[in-house]
Image: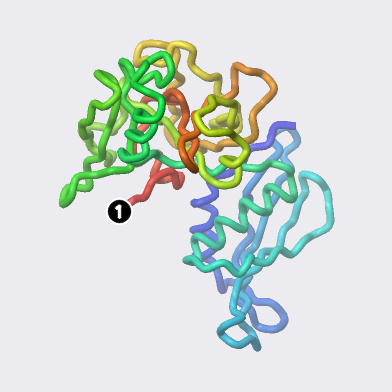
Amino acid sequence: MAIKIYQLPDQVKGLLATLGCASTVNGNRCSDYFIIAEDEEIGNDLSVSLIEERANLPQREWGYSMHVINDIKDTFCQIYHDDGNPGTPEEIALAMLKKIIAAELGIFSIPARLPTCKEWDALVDAVGESDDMLHWQNIFFWCQDGIPDCMSYRTIRGYHTARYLNHYHAALRCADTGRKASLGFRPIFTGPVVNLFPEGNVAAVGSLYMDGTPVRMPQNPVWDGDICDYIPGTKLEFRPALEDPAYQIQAIKVGNLLIADRVLLKNISWEDLAAQGFCVKD
């Protein structure tokens, strides 16, 4: 079974934009149905409709639910409710979609984002500046940090020394896509997965999928080595580690964070990463 997971932030936008195009019997607004996953071998899909739960309820009990049709597993329709956690409608809906994919298909995504400069420096302080361990030589990677009053540029680290710092423009512009062979994506992992690893250890934290296909980890992680190029517009997702070591992401634990020990993809812009929720987009 080859399951393709759609760009969930895009589906969230569609769900919220069409909220109110239909309604339930008690008057709650509903959205159109949107596909969030598809079995590419047989064409069946997993689709959802967002329901705004407000009718006849006090404001403190307002929330959302989703009606789920799972033709991939051919199960009965299900209703999923939000967990009552605070957040914007976009954040709540995105969390619900991830929950549904995990429950309906058994596919769990691992939270990941770009590191901050402070977090990278903490890693360098904790384990030293050895390129054999951190693989910073001859490849830049994106960090969250920007320049005050000039947030169209973001910080890049690596390439020359473990502590080298420079900036590169984040936005996709007509003259330049913001993508370079020498600039890549080194994620930091958060959430419950961090608690599974002892401090300072290097361990397999998961596998990276691009457009539903696992990405082989580079063995020569420099700009002209074997780091895989990002395919513009494709979805990136981190899932539990595959059994094949060639597809296992190695990460180092520092405090309550796990940082990948090398760049996983190159020719990827800050905007590409922001569009998929791996960094804060201003």
Residue 175 screen position, x and y as percent: 20, 33
Q: Residue furthest left?
A: 149
Vertically, is 89 above or below 29? above
Residue 93 screen position, x and y as percent: 56, 61
What is the total number of numbered labels drawn onto the structure image? 1
**Residue denoted by label 1:** 282
**Between 23 and 215, the one nearer to me in the picture:** 215
**Between 105 and 221, the one nearer to me in the picture:** 221
Residue shown at 49%/43% (left/top)? 256
Look at the numbered disc 1 and give the secondary structure of its residue.
Answer: loop
Residue shown at 61%/80% (left/top)? 61
Quadrant (top left/top right/bottom left/bottom right) for the N terminus: top right
In this picture, residue 55 sits left or right of residue 44: left
Vertically, is 263 above or below 59? above
In this picture, residue 49 sits left or right of residue 230: right
CA neighbours of label 1 inside 10 A, class few (<14), some (14 to 19), many (20+): few
Residue 22 screen position, x and y as percent: 62, 73
Residue shown at 64%/84% (left/top)? 55
Vertically, is 116 above or below 181? below
Q: Quadrant of residue 138?
A: top left
In this picture, residue 123 sits left or right of residue 59: left
Q: Colour scheme of this structure image?
A: rainbow
What amino acid does circle 1 point to? Asp
Residue shown at 58%/44% (left/top)? 6
From where the camera sits, is residue 158 visible?
Answer: yes
